[in-house]
Amino acid sequence: MHSRSTIALFSWLLLLGTAGADEAPGPVVPPPPEFANADGNQDQGVDRDEYGRIVIDRFDARDLNRDGVLNRGELRDFDSDRFLAADKDGNSKVSRQEFIRFRFADFERLDVDRNNNLDRREYENWRIDLH
């Protein structure tokens, strides 16, 4: 014979297991196209390799004169502090390597769960600041 506490526990677990069972699950929201495109392996996250490709693509898109560096005009949306933070060697230009390092600091800051992967929420926070 089962004790009252065992029966009470079992009843409680059954109640918890059926709570909300009549509720329909929420709609599955597909990822935004930019996130889906960035997530090349479709694992619902943007890993370091995928992120690196995005950063390089952004550098290339900004390098309007194709000289391999970004000047203040090509980084118009960077205020002076951000430009100086990216321009590590102080030559008033941001090289590809400087840009990559600068943007990977963003990755470290945004990867709040430290799994080396930006989930949709983390990616959206970065995307807002990307341009």
Image (tube, rainbow, N blue to C red):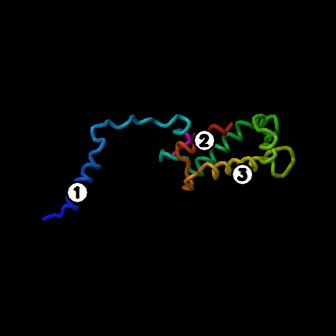
Which residue is located at x 63 percent, y 45 percent? 53
Task: Please name the amino acid that badge 1 sits on.
Answer: Ala
Task: Check disc 1 and report the residue beneath it.
Answer: 8
Query: Earlier along the polypeptide chain: callout 3 or callout 2?
Result: 3
SS class of the residue under badge 1?
helix
User: Label 3 belongs to which residue?
Assistant: 101
Image point 55% across, 54% down: which residue?
A: 113
Percent coordinates x, y for residue 10 in the rendering: 23, 56
Q: Secondary structure at mark 2?
A: helix
Mark 1 surroundings within 10 Å by alpha-carbon count, few (fewer than 14), some (14 through 19), many (20 or more) = few
Residue mark closest to the camera, 1 vs 3: 1
The span from disc 1 to disc 3 (Cα, nearest Å) is: 58 Å
Kindly check if marks 3 and 2 are in contact, taking CB atoms under 8 A apart as contact: no
Residue positioned most to the left: 1
Which residue range is magenta in the image?
37-41
Instruction: State the quadrant of the C terminus.
Output: top right
Residue type, label 3 = Arg
Residues 40 and 44: in front is: 44
Tell me the residue that label 2 is attached to. Answer: 125
Horizontal side of residue 34 vs 61, given as left or right? left
Q: From the top left corner, tell me how far across and down residue 86 is, in percent.
A: 77, 47
In three-dimensional space, the C-alpha distance between marks 3 and 2, rounded to whole angstroms, equals: 18 Å
